[in-house]
Amino acid sequence: MTSPSHKALVPFVSVDHMMRLINHIGLAPMMLGICDRIEADFHRWPLFDKTPRVASHSDVGVIELMPTSDGDVYGFKYVNGHPGNTKDGLQTVTAFGLLSDVANGYPVLFSEMTILTALRTAATSALAARVLAPKGATVMAMIGNGAQSEFQSIAMQAIVGITEVRLYDVDPAATAKCARNLQASGLKVVSCTSAEEAILGAHIITTCTADKQYATILTDNMVGAGVHLNAIGGDCPGKTELAPAILHRADIFVEYPEQTRIEGEIQQLDADHPVTEFWEVLTGTAKGRTDAKQITLFDSVGFAIEDFSALCYVRDAIKGTDFFTPLDMLADPDDPRDLFGMVARAK
């Protein structure tokens, strides 16, 4: 039997590897690094293949593929969203991803992305808030205290500079869990009993709820002038969080309009309602926040380029470490025309 050549082994970052990598680098520094990589790739936005994610919807959730390429490296993520999973003790979202060399099509990284997606989502939110939130923003309301809430809070602390997070969830146990997990963060953590209480004094309002329905987490009268809204819970058709009236008062920023108009808060608006692509703000070709009273809304549904950025960060971060396992997942016979012979000789 011919042993596989070294070039055919693909680095695999397992859940255990990912946790070790995060704790080795530090959660906040790693999210800062992913944020920097996302920002750099957004500056290269025109180079990437862009397409709305390929989604398979059911009455209980969605399974999606999110592909992109910059011409040199191809990447995709497999991800699901099943809000009812938590009642069975399962994650709402699970994911894995892969990078390949465009020149020969060989995979160069295979990685878990359940944890990594939480990091890249938080890093993207904080990048947008750093650009769009009012100057000197220090207080965030975190409405929806599930799996993403702690990552969002720490990313906003590390990247934006918030010092206080105000928590609310319809499930008090979720709020208690989030408050407990953030005890050592250095943030002032305030547990609230209503969304109205949570948004008091908040400069940034993040909504991240799980119900797959047209929900009204924020009503129009709850949103005052000058705040930045970070809406990340609405991420599929028929799932929103904001009252439509808020959208008509806000300047809306999105990742990729063709996807966000299907899945984001703006699915509630006419197809020609004006929005600004966030990458254009980063490159200076479009304006972001222009005055203190402006309401800015980052209608984020997640986009493949952000996953590409996170995977590239991990690919580079694991070099020279043992935070991966080399996988023999590619048939690579000595004679590329003799795949059958390799199988036959394996007896």
Image (cartoon, rainbow, N blue to C red):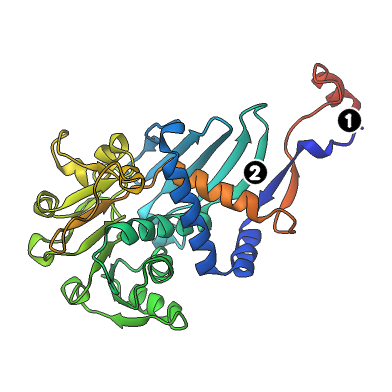
Q: Nearer the viewer, residue 110 or 277?
A: 277
User: Closer to us: mark 1 or mark 2?
Assistant: 2
Q: Which image quarter: residue 221?
A: bottom left
Residue at the top extreme of this rendering: 337
Residue 211 versus residue 203 in the image, above or below: above
Residue highlighted by disc 1: 346
Is 184 on the left or on the right of 163, as rendered?
Answer: right
Mark linked to residue 109: 2
Q: Residues within 10 Å of mark 1 (few under 14, many from 20)?
A: few
Q: Quadrant of the C terminus?
A: top right
SS class of the residue under badge 1?
loop
Specify whether residue 72 is in view: yes
Residue 178 screen position, x and y as percent: 39, 75
Is residue 74 positioned above or below 287 on the image? Answer: above
Give residue 291's position: percent from left, percent from top.
16, 59
The answer to which quarter of the image holds residue 323 is bottom right
Neighbourhood count class around disc 2 (C-alpha, 10 Å): few under 14, some 14–19, many 20 upward: many
Where residue 228 sits, quadrant-wise, is bottom left
The kind of residue tagged 2 is: Leu
**Left or right: 32 in relation to 229:** right
In percent of the image, x 42 and y 64: which residue is there?
Answer: 147
Where residue 322 sits: x, y (%)?
Answer: 75, 59
Foreground of the two, 13 or 128: 128
Q: Nearer the N terminus, badge 1 or badge 2?
A: 2
Question: At x 22% / y 75%, what residue is drawn?
Answer: 198
Which mark, residue 90? none
Q: Position of residue 146 (x, y in %)?
A: 37, 66
> From this viewpoint, which residue is outermost toward the front?
284
